[in-house]
Image (cartoon, rainbow, N blue to C red):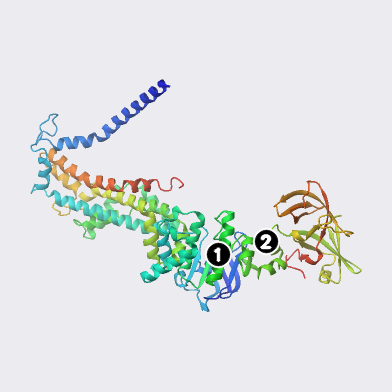
């Protein structure tokens, strides 16, 4: 009996040790970022303990540095990621509803064609998209950063799959209760799809927030619409890189994502597993 | 308050699939009309056409005298109760009841008054703040009924509302819907596949098959005088016995012979003269299980031309007993008193109640009379 318990304890401690090591590896870049962010200028790559005084000086510096408009970048990122994610969630919901519940000619073929585009790497679109955005005169604008990524086939797919599980009788019932098409969408479809909509919102927010290449391409270096990842890259000057400042700024850039995930984590997990289990 | 009239209404789906065809039906104001038939017979399609959830392919639909073919569901002033209740899961019972009124922009006090009234009638006042998830099947169905009655619509539509309930609750709700109808006096159209529901609830029954109406009549007439073999077999439980017989004429008699060397049933020509045109032809004889008697149980002495049959199984129901028998070529079910018990393999001598026989043409399956 006691041997059994001992065995179980041993097994558990082995498992947890392995998990802790795993967690450490996952967290290491993050911890390293914080570590570097606290160090004196020039000590970024040295394994010493030369910290700035006060210890948060680098963080203050990031916000106060007049030659580096971090707060502007931060705001731009919020606008681009927030706006993009909102529009993506909205359009995917509308499209998902139509593909899930409406009948029209060639519906399934159109849907599968759209899904097929998921197999093409995003980079392939970059040149034609850039050409279009340039011709529209959207260089250095929020539109240019947001709109090309608002059409999100994966989000559309997630939402269609979810909305197909909403019983038709609910929609029929709402119709008879006097709801217009828009009211059905607003009062029945949206509330019942909220977990999945949140998931799509979060995924697109994350994508837009961390998107670097596109936002670098559609902004000239003197643009006032630069986002954080592009702005952070500017920290790496031609001759030297302020690693300590770069890491302080990076630490800030993580905050919105972390906060969003914490708030939405319940929804998020529900959304990803929606329909997986019969309730 | 309104009457509903369908004139040659058809619903044909793409690929020429018939939903319902040439439906001619008039439902009077305050009437309770039941559409009944097996699955795929077009009864739900007909109801959805009336509701405005399906477009009419051809024909004319009137509600309260007004042609509503092109009027959307939301403007037809009807209410519908669905089989799976179709309650909005993210709204409280209260909000579910108020939804239709809110969309129609009723004043707040009026909404509250009506919700309370409906809740009182259906005895769901204590559930108003719950969500549908926290309700039992019967309670959910009450809420669904409540959602229909708060609107005080011109017409109630019921799409198999009791199918998801357990047997006991079904009987109880059946009665409550009937009482509710008596109280509210709103024209109602009720779809079911359950012939007991149809018989017990309807002022008028419409039996459907393969998209067509087979017969429209009041429940007792449908039972007593089914116009087709299908209706005869569908309405009544256990179903009517069908026996294929040859008709022969002999002097003052018309003789029905079971094929091969089976039983012989002589009838008086005077009473059954309509059968003479089927002389030397096959017809289908229909006998309801309660019209099959056994000479011993029914205490019939000196019975002539009895039909001998062997017991294959019995289904004692307590108050009555269904005995399944086999003649030479046919299975026959007999309904008798619960106390009349038999054993497998027993031989019984059967007589039919000759005043209650039904005859059907084997080709057209129409009633012969």
State the image coordinates of residue B163 (x, y, percent, origin top left): 56, 57
Q: Label for residue B67?
A: none
Q: Nearer the viewer, residue A272 or B173?
A: B173
Label 2 and label 1: CA atoms lie apart by 23 Å
The quarter of the image holding the N terminus of chain A is top left
| Residue closer to the observer: B183 or A262 | B183
- Left or right relative to A188: residue B192: right
Q: Which residue is mark 2?
A: B234
The location of residue B267, given as percent across then percent down, is: 86, 66
Q: Answer with left or right where residue B97 lies relative to residue B187.
A: left
Q: Is B63 above or below relative to B199?
A: below
Q: Chain of mark 2?
A: B
State whether residue B147 is above or below residue A10: below
- Please rate how many residues cluster around mark 2, counting C-alpha atoms within 10 Å: few if below 14, some from 14 to 19, many from 20: many
Crowding at label 1, few (<14), some or many (≥20) Cα neighbours within 10 Å? some
The image position of residue B43, as x and y in percent, is 58, 64
Cβ atoms at labels 2 and 1 below 8 Å apart: no
- At horizontal 39% and vertical 24% (from top left) the residue drawn is A5
Q: Which-is-in-front pick, marks 2 and 1? A: 1
- Report the disc number at residue B177: 1
Helix, strand or loop at label 2? It is helix
Residue at 42% x, 52% y: name it.
A161
Numbered disc 1: secondary structure: helix
Does residue B368 sit above or below A81 in this rendering? below
**Who is closer to the viewer here, B82 or B58?**
B82
Is residue A267 visible in the rendered image? The answer is: yes
């Amino acid at each position: 009996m006691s041997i059994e318990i001992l065995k179980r304890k041993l097994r558990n401690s082995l498992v947890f040790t392995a998990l802790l090591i795993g967690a450490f590896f996952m967290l290491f870049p993050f911890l390293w970022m914080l570590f570097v962010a606290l160090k004196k200028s020039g000590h970024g790559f040295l394994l010493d303990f030369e910290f700035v005084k006060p210890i948060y000086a680098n963080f203050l510096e990031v916000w106060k540095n007049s030659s580096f408009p971090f707060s502007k970048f931060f705001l731009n990122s919020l606008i681009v990621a927030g706006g993009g994610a909102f529009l993506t969630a909205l359009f995917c919901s509308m499209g998902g509803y139509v593909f899930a519940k409406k009948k029209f000619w060639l519906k399934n073929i159109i849907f599968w064609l759209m899904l097929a585009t998921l197999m093409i790497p995003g980079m392939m679109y970059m040149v034609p998209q850039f050409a279009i955005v340039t011709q529209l005169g959207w260089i250095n604008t929020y539109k240019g950063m947001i709109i090309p990524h608002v059409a999100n086939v994966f989000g559309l797919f997630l939402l269609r799959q979810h909305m197909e599980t909403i019983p038709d009788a609910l929609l029929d019932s709402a119709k008879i209760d006097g709801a217009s098409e828009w009211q059905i969408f607003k009062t029945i479809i949206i509330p019942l799809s909220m977990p999945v909509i949140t998931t799509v919102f979060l995924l697109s927010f994350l994508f837009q927030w961390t998107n670097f290449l596109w936002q670098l391409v559609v902004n000239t270096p003197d643009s006032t619409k630069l986002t954080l990842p592009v702005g952070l890259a500017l920290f790496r000057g031609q001759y030297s890189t302020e690693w300590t400042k770069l890491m302080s700024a990076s630490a800030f850039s993580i905050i919105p994502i972390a906060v969003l995930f914490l708030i939405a984590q319940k929804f998020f997990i529900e959304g990803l597993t929606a329909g997986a289990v019969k309730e | 308050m309104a009457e509903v009239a369908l004139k040659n209404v058809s619903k044909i789906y793409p690929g020429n699939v018939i939903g319902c065809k040439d439906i001619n039906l008039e439902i009077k104001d305050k009437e309770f009309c039941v559409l009944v038939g097996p699955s795929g017979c077009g009864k739900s399609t007909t109801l959805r056409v009336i509701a405005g959830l399906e477009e009419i392919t051809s024909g004319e639909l009137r509600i309260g005298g007004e042609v509503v073919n092109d009027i959307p569901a939301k403007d037809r002033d009807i209410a519908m109760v669905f089989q799976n209740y179709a309650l909005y899961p993210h709204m409280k019972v209260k909000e579910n009841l108020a939804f239709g009124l809110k969309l129609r922009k009723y004043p707040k006090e009026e909404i509250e008054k009506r919700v309370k009234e409906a809740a009182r009638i259906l005895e769901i006042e204590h559930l108003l703040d719950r969500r549908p998830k926290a309700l039992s099947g019967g309670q959910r169905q009450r809420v669904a009924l409540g959602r229909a009655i708060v609107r005080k619509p011109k017409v109630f539509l019921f799409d198999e509302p009791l199918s998801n309930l357990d047997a006991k609750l079904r009987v109880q709700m059946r009665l409550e819907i009937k009482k509710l109808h008596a109280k509210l006096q709103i024209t109602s159209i009720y779809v079911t596949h359950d012939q007991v529901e149809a018989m017990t609830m309807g002022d008028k029954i419409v039996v459907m098959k393969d998209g067509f109406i087979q017969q429209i009549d009041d429940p007792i007439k449908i039972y007593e005088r089914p116009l087709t073999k299908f209706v005869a077999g569908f309405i009544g439980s256990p179903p009517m016995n069908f026996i294929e017989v040859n008709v022969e004429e002999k002097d003052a008699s018309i003789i029905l012979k079971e094929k091969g060397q089976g039983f012989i049933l002589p009838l008086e020509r005077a009473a059954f003269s309509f059968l003479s045109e089927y002389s030397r032809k096959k017809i289908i004889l229909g006998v309801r299980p309660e019209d099959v008697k056994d000479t011993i149980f029914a205490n019939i002495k000196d019975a002539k031309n009895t039909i001998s049959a062997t017991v294959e199984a019995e289904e004692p129901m307590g108050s009555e007993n269904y005995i399944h028998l086999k003649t030479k070529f046919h299975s026959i079910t007999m309904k008798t008193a619960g106390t009349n018990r038999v054993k497998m393999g027993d031989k019984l001598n059967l007589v039919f109640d000759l005043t209650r026989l039904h005859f059907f043409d084997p080709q057209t399956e129409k009633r012969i009379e």
